[in-house]
Every structure is written in C-alpha cells, then in structure tokens.
Image: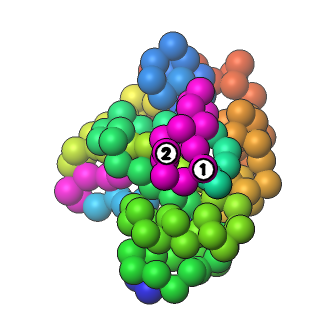
C-alpha cells in the first residue's frame, strides 16, 4: 500500500481569518501533496447539505453528510477512513488515516463499519502558488503526528481547534501576511 511522505506525518493548512467570506474562509485543509510542481489537499471541515446516501443511490447504507473537499473536480469523491480494507487504491497517509478515490474501496470501507468521511473535490495550487499565498498571509501551517483533528473533532470545530493548537487567537491575525 503506497504511503505519502510527511515529516511530521500530517500537514494541515489553516485558513487565516482574513479569508472569511471566500471559498476558503475558516477552512482546514489536509495537505496531500506538495512539490515544486504544485500542491493538493482536502478541505476537511466544510459539510455539505447532502447526505452521503443521496449521492450514492445504490448505497442506502451510506451514512453521514458529505464534505466539500475543494473546488477542483467536485465530481470526484475522496474517502478518508481509519483501517485498511485490503483493496486496490488504498493510500496510507499515517497510522489511522487512509484515503481512496476508488468506488469499490469506498464500498468495502462502508461494509467494514468503520468511521469514514466522504469529500467531494479537492483544493489545488500551481507551482509556487501555495508558497505565495502563505507569504501573503492566507495560510498558517500546522504539523500533526496523528489524525486526531479529523477523527476526534467535529468538522465545524476543526478550524478553531487547529488555531488553538497553534496558540493563535484569530482576532490578532492581521491581513497582508509576513513581510521581509
């Protein structure tokens, strides 16, 4: 099973308070990939009004509410889950957190009875774009060794929980970012 390299294991992008009112306002993004060519991640705290069972009419057993993972390819579903099911397309991010875009694997995850989150779409940045947005003050970076923010925190509370872990009071963050 392939594993993404992360040191520390997970990197989250925490939206700066001045992004409120935009698509990424109060967003917490699990960074999946970050190279010279660009970056990709999943917004893990934007619940949609759509039950997962409505998105999957052939799966009335599906539970929970879908999340909007990002504005890129919202027709593509991502499943985050805790334990391997031994299926094709499993991507182990860290202990206790796997991801897949394979429908068959998602069906096995549902059948296993384990907790999961279904996200539609992803967030993407071109080469250098995420670095520039960070310099402009759009993102705070949080590194975590476990997926506790995903599994132990309600989606609506994730952004504030991430700020708390960083020791940041959102009212003290000025727009404009770091200037040299």
Residue most extreme to the top: 21
Region rendered in magenta:
36-60
Residue at image point 36% right, 34% down: 71
Q: Is residue 20 above or below residue 2?
A: above
Query: How far across and down, in percent of the image, does residue 43 sit?
Result: 51, 42
- Residue 79 in sight here: yes
Q: Is residue 151 above or below residue 1?
A: above
Q: Is residue 24 left or right of residue 88?
A: right
Q: Is residue 100 above or below residue 24?
A: below
Query: How far across and down, in percent of the image, does residue 47 sit?
Result: 60, 34
Q: Nearer the viewer, residue 132 or 76?
A: 76
- Residue 42 in sight here: no
Few, some or many residues within 10 Å of mark 2 (<14, 14–19, 20+): few
Residue at image point 79% right, 54% down: 152
Q: Nearer the viewer, residue 105 or 159?
A: 105
Displayed quadrant of residue 78: bottom left
Residue at image point 38% right, 43% down: 121
What distance separates the C-alpha of mark 1 from that of mark 2?
A: 6 Å
**Magenta-span inclusion, residue 39:** yes
Query: How far across and down, in percent of the image, does residue 84 sit?
Result: 58, 80
Residue at image point 73% right, 57% down: 151
Displayed quadrant of residue 28: top right
Q: Nearer the viewer, residue 88 or 110?
A: 110
Numbered marks: total = 2
- Residue 60 image label: 1
Few, some or many residues within 10 Å of mark 1 (<14, 14–19, 20+): few
How is the rendered protein coloured? rainbow
As helix, strand or loop, the secondary structure at mark 2 comes to loop
Q: Are marks 1 and 2 in contact (CB under 8 Å)?
A: yes
Q: Is residue 83 left or right of residue 88?
A: right
Q: Which residue position holds label 2?
A: 57
Query: How far across and down, in percent of the image, does residue 179 sit?
Result: 42, 30
């Amino acid at each position: 099973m392939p594993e993404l390299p992360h040191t520390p294991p997970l990197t989250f992008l925490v939206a700066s308070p001045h992004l409120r009112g935009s698509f990424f306002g109060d967003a917490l993004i699990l960074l999946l990939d970050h190279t010279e060519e660009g970056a990709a991640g999943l917004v893990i705290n934007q619940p949609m009004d759509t039950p997962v069972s409505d998105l999957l009419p052939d799966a009335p057993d599906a539970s929970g509410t879908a999340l909007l993972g990002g504005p890129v390819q919202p027709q593509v579903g991502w499943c985050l889950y805790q334990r391997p099911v031994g299926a094709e397309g499993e991507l182990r991010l860290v202990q206790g957190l796997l991801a897949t875009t394979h429908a068959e694997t998602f069906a096995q995850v549902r059948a296993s009875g384990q907790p999961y989150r279904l996200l539609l779409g992803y967030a993407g940045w071109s080469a250098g774009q995420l670095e520039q947005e960070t310099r402009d003050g759009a993102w705070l970076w949080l590194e975590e060794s476990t997926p506790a923010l995903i599994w132990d925190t309600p989606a609506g509370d994730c952004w504030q929980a991430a700020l708390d872990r960083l020791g940041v009071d959102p009212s003290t963050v000025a727009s404009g970012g770091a200037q040299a």
